[in-house]
Image (cartoon, rainbow, N blue to C red):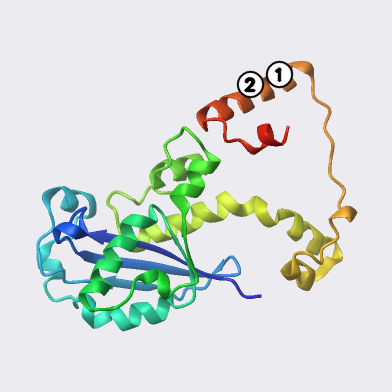
Amino acid sequence: MTVRQVFLDTETTGLSPEAGDRLIEIGCLEMVNRRLTGRNLHLYLNPERSSTEDAFKVHGISDEFLADKPRFAEVADELLSYLADAELIIHNAPFDVGFIDAELARLSRGPLRERVARITDSLLMAREMFPGKSNSLDALCRRLEVDNTERTLHGALLDAGLLAEVYVRMTRGQDSLVIDAVAAGGGPAAAAAGAAVDFAALSLLAVDVSDHERAAHEAVLADLDKASGGKTLWRRLA
């Protein structure tokens, strides 16, 4: 089964679509079956208003640069066609989706969610994985060793690319056993089917640990449990 995902990021004139702030940039990267395809979409938009001073400090995109760019209405069909039926992965999705929905509403069109397969918020994923820690895109890049040295200013396409790398690293364990089964002769068809892989045939390495290591591990688990407010699954199962 083909899995098509689109990593999406936006830049805006400010923080509130309800107050009239508008989109100025949309960056999208396409991934199919966990491989970037290079079929990306990058749009600059004329928002028909100025960016706030704080927003300009974040993205550095001037009103003069945007003056001759298309308005959202001129690119709406292209954007919706590109996003159609994909899983969108967005960091802090309510922010970006809120702005896109506001633009669509101006054109009397339905919300973005009706056009795509699903919307995944990578910020919520990160909070589940790293409770009690900073989970901004920059923080995740540092934690997961993704090179973000070129990110002196926010840019939609650059940030979408960083998000794609972060997402792959956050989820790389989800299919590692399937990949190992393929390498052992299970074949790509077995990996795609998921349930067809015989996990009983996999040999997992057991490591002996000392009492000191076991106590240190329990301390880490206790800290995670406390930071998540008692939501850790292993405590519930125990």
Q: How many marks?
A: 2
Horizontal relation, residue 7 to residue 111: left or right: right
Mark pair 2, 1: CA separation? 6 Å
Horizontal relation, residue 8 to residue 175: left or right: left
Say which of 193 and 160 sits in front: 193
Q: Position of residue 106 (x, y in %)?
A: 20, 74
Report whether residue 146 is seen: no
Q: Position of residue 209 (x, y in %)?
A: 80, 24
Q: Residue at x 11, y 72 (%)?
A: 67
Quadrant containing the C terminus in the rendered view:
top right
Eyeballing the image, is 152 above or below 208?
below
Q: Residue at x 9, y 67 (%)?
A: 64
Report whether residue 201 is seen: yes
Say which element carries label 1: helix
Q: Position of residue 89 (x, y in %)?
A: 46, 61
Q: Residue at x 34, y 77 (%)?
A: 79
Residue position for label 2? 219
Instruction: Report the amino acid beneath label 1.
Output: Ala
Q: Position of residue 164 (x, y in %)?
A: 48, 59
Instruction: Report the amino acid beneath label 2.
Output: Ala
Horizontal relation, residue 123 to residue 1: left or right: left
Q: Residue furthest right?
A: 201
Instruction: Tell me if mark 2 has few (under 14), some (14-19) or many (20+) residues whose alpha carbon lies within 10 angstroms of its own.
Output: few
Say which of 85 and 205 sits in front: 85
Eyeballing the image, is 140 above or below 48?
above
Cβ–Cβ below 8 Å for labels 2 and 1?
yes
Residue position for label 1? 215
Say which quarter of the image contains residue 4.
bottom right
Say which element carries label 2: helix
Eyeballing the image, is 68 above or below 181?
below
